[in-house]
Image (cartoon, rainbow, N blue to C red):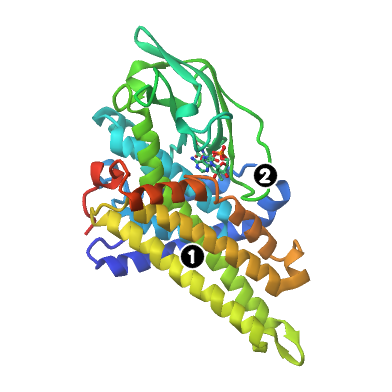
Amino acid sequence: MNVHADPAERHEALRQQVREFACAEIAPRIAEMEATGGVDHEVPALIAKQGWIAVTVGAEHGGMNAGHLAKTLVIEELSRVSGAMGAMAQASMLGAAKIIHFGSGEQQRTWLPRVADGSCLPTIAVTEPGSGGHVLGMASTARRRGREYVLTGRKVYVGNSHIGDLHGVVVRTGRGSKGLSAFLVEADRPGFSLAPHRPSMGLHGFSFGEITLDQCRIPASNLIGEHGDGLAVAYSSSVLYGRPNLTAVALGIHQAIMDETVRFVQERERYGGPLADLPTIRQRVGAMQSRLMAARTVAYDAVHRLDQGLPCDPELMNAKYVNVEAVLDTARTAMEIHAAAGLQKDRPLERLVRDAFHIYAPAGTGDIQLHRLAEEALGTSRGQWSQRLLPAPVA
Ligand SMILES: Cc1cc2nc3c(=O)[nH]c(=O)nc-3n(C[C@H](O)[C@H](O)[C@H](O)COP(=O)(O)OP(=O)(O)OC[C@H]3O[C@@H](n4cnc5c(N)ncnc54)[C@H](O)[C@@H]3O)c2cc1C
């Protein structure tokens, strides 16, 4: 990337680069990912090698230092071709967040260059079978034993569970909201294991599975941040990375549904002309276009504010809410326009619709975003992560 070009040119060049890569390297492999429903290892390795997982990592650690709008463009363009690979990339960008914000100098020097060169895919593991949105309900524990911690418990729906090298695990080390701590757990530690991959409705090729910690011993130096910082690690990662990342996946899938529907209404003939000539179809396409444009504006505005160092937690939450609602509405409209053809597996639409449903739960369901937005409106919110962990403005 030409670091001397103005930001708009840099962003456009990056978008083109990712788009060309996705069309050349990912698109031809989608049929196989869909057919097997397994975990893809090859494409994630290719993506990681591009350096894009480290798009917000500082140049001193080999990262792109390109900021959050650039991150959105990378995820959006990958997701436009493959929601699964967009979800994969964002999951490890999210995994890197805690090292960027809370990692010690040594942890940053050890891990961030490996994220940048593609040799390490980090994750974040917060969710448990008994605690999803209710983060404080988690039951996994870490106990100090001399120079080590011993971790025990189960984490579920961990993005990149089956390809991750370095898991960021948040567990209980005490009571209450100060009783959570975060640790780095390398995937080859004794006591760490993976449950077999369970294929899901969509995002075929991506893994968001279960990890088990059975008396898993790690050095005390693997603690991330301070003892008791676990909730801050979980919440800040989710707000500053999780929300905008999933927003970008939704946006990419949304654009793909739009592309596919426009192609369909121009090609399909009814009443002696293309479907696009029917007034009701045009109204629906217009409504889809309006939703897509509004969703994109909200998405880009939120991350632009983050890049400017402005407080923007509500914007990041709203962007996730608006983009997920918008893509699900558009998915339904697109299915109605396609009618029976939309159900066919030899068309991309049914895959895109299945993938879109996966974006609702991660980084806070719609209910959680509305809950937080209500706190903002009512003046009861307890501060903003974008203010507390203000990133340096990106030129
Ligand atoms: C594709 C994908 C990737 C994921 N990646 C990760 C990851 O990398 N790391 C990780 O730790 N987890 C990950 N998750 C898990 C995700 O964070 C959880 O699914 C999410 O927190 C919701 O938890 P849950 O599914 O258990 O639902 P629950 O929290 O049990 O919610 C069930 C229902 O109750 C509602 N609800 C819950 N709490 C409230 C409330 N306070 N007010 C109003 N309504 C409420 C919800 O909106 C929902 O309708 C991922 C999930 C998916 C699908």
Is residue 16 among what the camera can see?
no
* Badge nearest the viewer, 2 or 1: 2
The amino acid on which the numbered mark 2 sits, given as a three-letter code, is Ser
Q: Locate residue 215 relative to residue 67 in the image: left or right.
A: right
Task: Tell me residue 314's x, y (percent).
Answer: 35, 53
Give the label on residue 200, or none. 2
The amino acid on which the numbered mark 1 sits, given as a three-letter code, is Glu
Q: How many angstroms separate mark 2 from mark 1 (CA)?
A: 28 Å
Give residue 82's quadrant in the image: bottom right
Q: Residue at x 61, y 83 (%)?
A: 282
Q: Residue at x 41, y 65 (%)?
A: 15
For mark 1, what is the residue?
Answer: 20
- 128 shown above or below 72: above
Quadrant of image for the C terminus: bottom left
Between 11 and 153, which is closer to the camera in this rendering?
A: 153
- The residue carrying pointer 1 sits among few (fewer than 14), some (14 to 19) or many (20 or more) residues within 10 Å by Cα, namely some
Quadrant of the picture in which ligand 1 is shown: top right
Q: Is ligand 1 within 8 Å of the beta carbon of the residue shown at mark 1?
A: no
Task: Tell me residue 133's x, y (percent).
Answer: 50, 38
Q: Residue at x 23, y 53 (%)?
A: 309
Q: Residue at x 27, y 65 (%)?
A: 7
